Image (cartoon, rainbow, N blue to C red):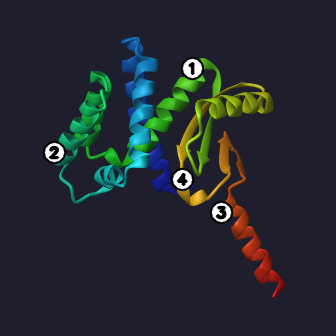
Amino acid sequence: MTSETTGSAGLADRYATALFELAEDGKALDTVAGELDSLGKMISESDDLERLIRSPVISRDDQRKAMDAVLESAGIGDLTRKFVGLVARNRRLFALPDMIAAYRDMLAGRRGETTAEVVTAQALSDAQLSALGTALEKTTGTKVAVAASVDAGLLGGMVVKVGSRMVDSSLRTKLQRMRLAMKGIG
């Protein structure tokens, strides 16, 4: 593991821990989790928002104002908005997706759950998410919280990560394997 990865993960864990403790004190763990999930979904679905949080060219004040406007229009609560404002003031918005994932992991740990990261080519319906969660619970033997995201580049299928295990049944990966196999033949 590189020191950059370790540093970024440590940074995300520290911020997520602080938010978790504040949310716990305010008895708002689930509320904040829902708001962070919404924010994470907005970031993953918007190239402009992704660019906003990652760009070193945009001033911290402009980032903070833009994020506050986005969060206010999305109906995000005061604690989460203040947290994101602090992250923006400290020039750490680039790590916001990792902070969201770290918070989700802490909450799952508190509940005795395992988090399964599921990436699909198209958004899953509530019924599909429920069926997937049930199947993963049977496989892992523990409660599973499904964190779903969309990557159209997968073409079809899904990638599921539970702890250190990953199952990649995406069409993109199958096509890559086929291409490599065909190159080996010729």
Mark 1: which amino acid? Answer: Arg
- Residue under the point 36% across and 52% down: 50
Estimate the x, y position of residue 73 in percent, counting from the top left.
25, 33
Q: Marks 2 and 1, how far apart in space?
A: 35 Å
Left or right, 136 with respect to 116, comes to right
In primary-sequence order, the first of circles 4 and 1 is: 1
Cα distance, mark 4 to mark 3? 11 Å
Classify residue 162 as left or right of residue 69. Answer: right
Frontmost residue, 83 versus 120: 120
Q: Earlier in the sequence, mark 2 or mark 1?
A: 2
**Residue assigned mark 4:** 151
The reply to whether residue 11 is in sight is: no
Left or right: 110 as drawn, with respect to 22: right
Q: Nearer the viewer, mark 4 or mark 2?
A: 4
Horizontal arrangement in the rendering, residue 8 relative to residue 172 (left or right)? left
Mark 1 or mark 3, earlier in chain: 1
Label 1 and label 3: CA atoms lie apart by 35 Å
| Dot 1 alpha-carbon crowd within 10 angstroms: few under 14, some 14 to 19, many 20 or more | few
Local secondary structure at mark 1: helix
> Picture quarter containing residue 67?
top left
Q: Is residue 121 above or below residue 100?
A: below
The local secondary structure at tag 2 comes to: helix
> Which residue is identified by label 1?
110
Residue position for label 2? 61
Say the numbered circle drawn on residue 13: none
For the residues marked 2 and 3, what is the alpha-carbon distance in whole angstroms?
A: 40 Å
Label count reads 4
